[in-house]
Amino acid sequence: MNLILLGPPGAGKGTQAGKIISKYKIPQISTGDILRAAVREGTELGKEAKSYMNAGKLVPDSVVIGIIRDRLKHSDCANGYLLDGFPRTIAQAEELDKILLAMGNKINAVVSVEVPDQEIVNRVSGRRMCKDCGAVYHVTFTPPKTANICDKCGGELYQRDDDKEATIKARLQIYKEQTEPLKKYYNSKNLLKEVEGTGDINKIFNKIESILDNI
Ligand code: AP5
Ligand code: MG
């Protein structure tokens, strides 16, 4: 199963991705996670991406397309994959179509998680992530059992540099301008599945499951 998870910053893509990959046994490919790892490691890619990310802007298309082209060649993608945070522009979507055509592969569904703006600001400003395994928490909605320690691996939790209120607003604006048009793009290909992303995390996953079990 080859999937795309679409949605504004803080919609719960990473949260739902964790559940999807565990049930369907496919790898999660998050361009955000890949870029953050590169920033942490101080690689050339990280140096290039850092200023865009901290300003809430998109990293240039050519950079992320290169990441995805390489990543899809890995053997763990042979039985499917979940793209989280890619594509994010029409140019990225068109390039993805070309890459997949050349590989004899195609997307089976695009799940778009819908959440209102105010809820997004609340969610993102309280988010904490594990430095080691990337697990996602929220200080109020989904706190870890011990403050600042990951339940899953014992790693330290941190706040992302781009999770400050002004940056969140910039990211939301960019989502509306550059990423939301992808809904129309994928709807015209009959791939778009919109899911209401507010409320209980498990109930949201149940809605996603019922879509994926039928494709
Ligand atoms: P990226 O890492 O992809 O960030 P994003 O799209 O802004 O999305 P987030 O990761 O912020 O949110 P999410 O939807 O995963 O929500 P989460 O599950 O964590 O990208 C970061 C940056 O990298 C970009 O700004 C850009 O610079 C660059 N980049 C990445 N991909 C790129 C691309 N393709 N092209 C160009 N640049 C790219 O949940 C959020 C919080 O809410 C958590 O605290 C969680 O616990 C909580 N939560 C989740 N669900 C619920 C719920 N139902 N109820 C209550 N709380 C909830
Ligand atoms: Mg995420």
Image (cartoon, grey):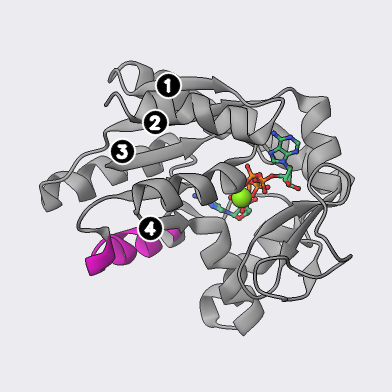
Query: Which SS class for mark 4?
Result: loop
Please tell me whether residue 69 belongs to the stretch shown in magenta: yes
Q: Which of 8 and 53 lies nearest the eye of the viewer?
A: 8
Upstream in the sequence, badge 4 or badge 2?
A: 4
Asked where in the image residue 75 lies, by quadrant, the reply is bottom left
The crowding category of the residue bearing disc 4, from other C-alpha atoms within 10 Å (few below 14, some 14 to 19, many at least 20), is: many
Amino acid tagged 3? Glu
Query: Which SS class for mark 1?
Result: strand
The crowding category of the residue bearing disc 2, from other C-alpha atoms within 10 Å (few below 14, some 14 to 19, many at least 20), is: many
The crowding category of the residue bearing disc 1, from other C-alpha atoms within 10 Å (few below 14, some 14 to 19, many at least 20), is: some
Residue at point 54%, 33% (across, down): 205
Question: Which residue is the site of mark 2?
Answer: 110
Please tell me whether residue 138 belongs to the stretch shown in magenta: no
Instruction: Answer whether labels 4 and 2 touch (C-beta < 8 Å).
Output: no
Q: Which of 104 and 51 lies nearest the eye of the viewer?
A: 104
Question: Which residue is the site of mark 3?
Answer: 94
Amino acid tagged 4? Pro
119 relative to 12, above or below:
above
Chain part drawn in magenta: 64-76
Q: How far apart are marks 1 and 4 (CA)?
A: 20 Å
Residue at point 83%, 36% (across, down): 121
**In the rendering, at what x and y percent does residue 26 appear?**
34, 54
Question: Which residue is the site of mark 1?
Answer: 193
Upstream in the sequence, badge 3 or badge 1?
A: 3
Q: Which quadrant is home to the C terminus? A: top left
**Disc 3: residue Cβ within 8 A of ligand 1's nearest atom:** no
**Disc 4: residue Cβ within 8 A of ligand 2's nearest atom:** no
Residue at point 52%, 66% (across, down): 34
Upstream in the sequence, badge 2 or badge 3?
A: 3
Q: Distance between the residues labelled 3 and 1?
A: 19 Å
